[in-house]
Image (cartoon, grey):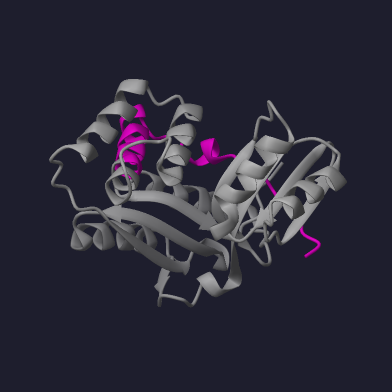
Amino acid sequence: MGRIFEKRKHSIWKTAASNSKLYSKFSKQLYMAAKNGVPDPAANPALRNFVERAKRENVPSHVIDKAILKAAGTGSEDFQPARYEGFGPGGSLVIVDCLTDNNTRTISDVRSCFTKTGSKLAANGSVVMSFDHMAILSFEGDDEDKVLEAMFAADVAIEEVESKDGTITVFAPPTEFYKAKTALLEAFPGLELEVQEITFLPQVTKVLSKEDFAAFERFLGMLSDCDDVQEIHHNVSLPG
C-alpha cells in the first residue's frame, strides 16, 4: 500500500474530557464485550482487549471489575452500536462510532455538533468508503523479516508490514487482530505493543487551513463531550 501509519494521539482530543467521561466510555465497552461473550477476559479476546486498553488509559481496576461483574449479573442496559458519517470543517471526512441505549438522544447530540460547526451529516456508507478498516499493531523494532515469518507461520492474512524509524507496524484485516497479536507475542517474548487497535485509516489525508483546523478541533472537542461517542475517525493530517 505504500502507506506510513500516522499514530494518532487520542489524548489531543480528550484533554477537555473528565475522568468520569473516560470511565463511562470504557464501562460501556467492557459491559458490552462481556455481555456479548463471556465475562472472563481469559476466555473472551474482545473483552481482554478492552481491559488492556482501559488499563493503558489508567482506568482504575474497580471501574473495570464493576463493568464486568455487572454484565455477569443482572445488568439490564441494552447498548447498541451506532455509526454516523459526515463532512466536517474544511471538507474533512469524519466517522463517529457510538454506543447508545437511546438512539434519539444520540443522533440529536451528534447532529448538534455537526450543525454548530457548519458541518454536515451524510448518508451511511458515503464516507466510510474512503477509509480502510484495519487492525493495527505497532511496536519498537527493525526485524521486518522476522515479523513476516511469524505472521506466515501463524497463517495470519496480513495486508502489509512497514518498518520505519525503529518502529514496525503490522496492518491486517480486522478479523485477524487477535490472531496477529498472539503470533507477535509468541514470536517476541516481552513485546510491548505501542498501538493495538482496530480502526479506520483514511485512504487519502487532508491538510486544513489554520482557520479550518481551529474549527475542526472545536468540532472534535464537542463530539468527544457527547456521552455516547466512543471513537472518532477522520482523514485530517495532524500537525507535528
Residue 8 visible (yes or no) = no
The quadrant the N terminus occupies is: bottom right
Residue 214: within the magenta? no
Instruction: List x then y, in percent, for residue 8.
Output: 61, 44
Q: Quadrant of the C terminus?
A: top right
Residue 47 appears in the picture as rendered: yes
Residue 192 picture quarter: top right
Q: Is residue 200 above or below residue 167?
A: below
Residue drawn at x 68%, y 55% as measured from the top left = 171
Left or right of 83? Residue 199 is right
Q: Tell whether position 5 is magenta.
A: yes
Where does residue 166 sit, x and y in percent of width and height?
Answer: 83, 36
**Residue at coordinates 42% horizontally, 70% vertically from top-left?**
120
Residue 22: quarter of image: top left
* Along the line of sight, the residue nearer the viewer: 12 or 126: 126
Image: 72 above or below 217: above
Q: Total of numbered circles in the picture?
A: 0
Which span of residues is magenta-colored? 1-30
Q: Is residue 34 left or right of residue 133?
A: left
